[in-house]
């Protein structure tokens, strides 16, 4: 699994997951339970991860949706 994006914005995260799933990719949200431990105040970001083989396609989907600024720098490698 590779990190695609990291954000505190639950709407953005859900939107990205739906975009990827509509394209046939499986996306997972990680760190979701960690954010609950910190009191759900939104300090700790959640990450969207995809299978390493699907990372390039997922990055393309985000670029086409004009969400390039959200692509994690870890996803650039």
Image: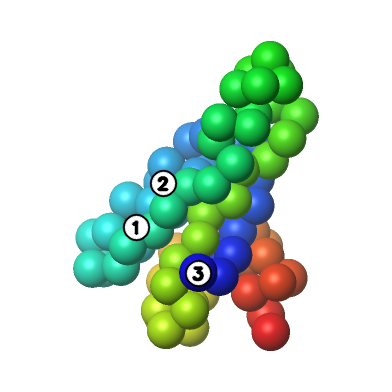
Quarter-of-image position of residue 76: bottom right
Residue 16 percent coordinates (x, y): 43, 53
Q: Nearer the viewer, mark 3 or mark 2?
A: 3
- The mark nearer the N terminus, 3 or 1, is 3
- Does the image show residue 77? yes
- Residue underneath mark 3: 1
- The mark nearer the N terminus, 3 or 2, is 3
Q: Are marks 3 and 2 in contact (CB under 8 Å)?
A: no
Could you tell me which residue is drawn at 64 percent across and 29 percent down?
35
Question: In this picture, is 63 found above or below 5?
Answer: below
Question: In this picture, is 37 found above or below 54?
Answer: above
Could you tell me which residue is drawn at 67 percent across and 65 percent down?
72
Choose between 41 and 51: the one closer to the eye. 51
Compute the Cα span from label 2 to label 1: 6 Å
Under tag 1, what secondary structure? Answer: helix
Under tag 3, what secondary structure? Answer: loop
Residue 45 percent coordinates (x, y): 68, 40
Question: In this picture, is 57 found above or below 44?
Answer: below
Left or right: residue 31 versus residue 43 is left
Quarter-of-image position of residue 51: bottom left
- Residue underneath mark 2: 15
Compute the Cα span from label 3 to label 2: 19 Å
Q: For residue 19, which numbered disc appears in the image?
A: 1
């Amino acid at each position: 699994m590779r990190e695609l994006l990291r954000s505190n914005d639950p709407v953005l995260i859900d939107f990205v997951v739906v975009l990827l799933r509509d394209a046939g990719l499986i996306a997972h949200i990680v760190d979701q339970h960690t954010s609950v431990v910190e009191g759900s105040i939104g300090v700790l970001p959640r990450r969207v991860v995809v299978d390493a083989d699907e990372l390039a396609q997922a990055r393309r989907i985000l670029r086409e949706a004009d969400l390039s600024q959200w692509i994690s720098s870890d996803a650039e490698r």
